[in-house]
Image: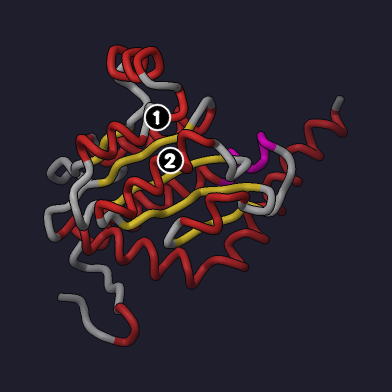
Amino acid sequence: MRELIYYTFTESADLKKAFVEENRDKIYEVFLEIAKRLKEGRKILLCGNGGSAADCQHIAAELVGRFTLERRALPAIALTTDTSVLTALANDYSFDRIFERQVEALGEEGDVLISISTSGNSKNVINAVNRAKEKGLLTVGFLGKDGGELAKICHHSFIVRSHSTPRIQEVHVTLGHVLCDFIEKFLFSYDLYFPPCGEGRE
């Protein structure tokens, strides 16, 4: 059991290191775009199932509340939390439409939809992304394995190249924390400098 404990921690750490080495520049570019959209008054919607639903709620809570800085609240909505809406949509339509319908109701052109799926093949998440793209939202996937169908349709995909759901989720949590930290510092910490593509901050 001692070996299992050590292996679990080191496997998680190694996967995070491999992920950031592959995606560091992409993370910067995509997160910068998200931060700019928030600066322009847009909002973030998030969707996912199971543990990924919990990650959606976690990220939304950090943005509406705070991560490390005292600052104004930021608009972020986890589409996984309203039980009356979720059960009504699942009952009246189907479970495959529980996020799509909320994107239709709440999403506006210029907003961001972050979709979290360890398989990349969750039908209700795929439907939400397709609807978001129709409405002019920026779509970002936090994915696992080979990225699945979502990797083909999201504007930007971050794929954790593992077949272990727990390890994928651990990277997604870290990626969500980096997103919150990046947004806070870009929007509210003026002693830091994030030059987009060689240009100065606006």
What residue is drawn where x is 44% and y is 44%?
A: 115
Query: In which quadrant of the rendered image does the N terminus lie?
Result: top right
Query: Which residue type carries mark 2?
Result: Asn
Residue 149 x %, y %: 58, 50
Dominant SS of magenta comes to helix
Query: Which residue type carries mark 1?
Result: Arg
Distance between the alpha carbons at the discs numbered 2 and 1: 7 Å
- Left or right side of 194 for 53: right
- Considering only vertical position in the picture, is 138 above or below 23? above
Q: In which quadrant of the rendered view does residue 73 lie?
A: top left
The residue at which mark 2 appears reads as 127
Marks 2 & 1, CB-CB < 8 Å contact = yes
Stretch of the chain drawn in magenta: 165-171
Magenta-colored stretch includes residue 99: no
What residue is drawn where x is 17% and y is 52%?
A: 42
The residue at which mark 1 appears reads as 97
Residue 156 x %, y %: 45, 61
Q: Which of 96 and 146 is in front in this view?
A: 96
What residue is drawn where x is 52% and y is 68%?
A: 24
**Going from the N terminus, do you reach mark 2 or mark 1 first?**
1
Q: Does residue 61 appear anywhere in the picture?
A: no
Instruction: Report crowding for label 1: few under 14, some 14 to 19, many 20 or more residues within 10 A (C-alpha).
Output: many
Magenta-colored stretch includes residue 170: yes
Q: Which of 15 and 188 is in front in this view?
A: 15
Instruction: Report crowding for label 2: few under 14, some 14 to 19, many 20 or more residues within 10 A (C-alpha).
Output: some
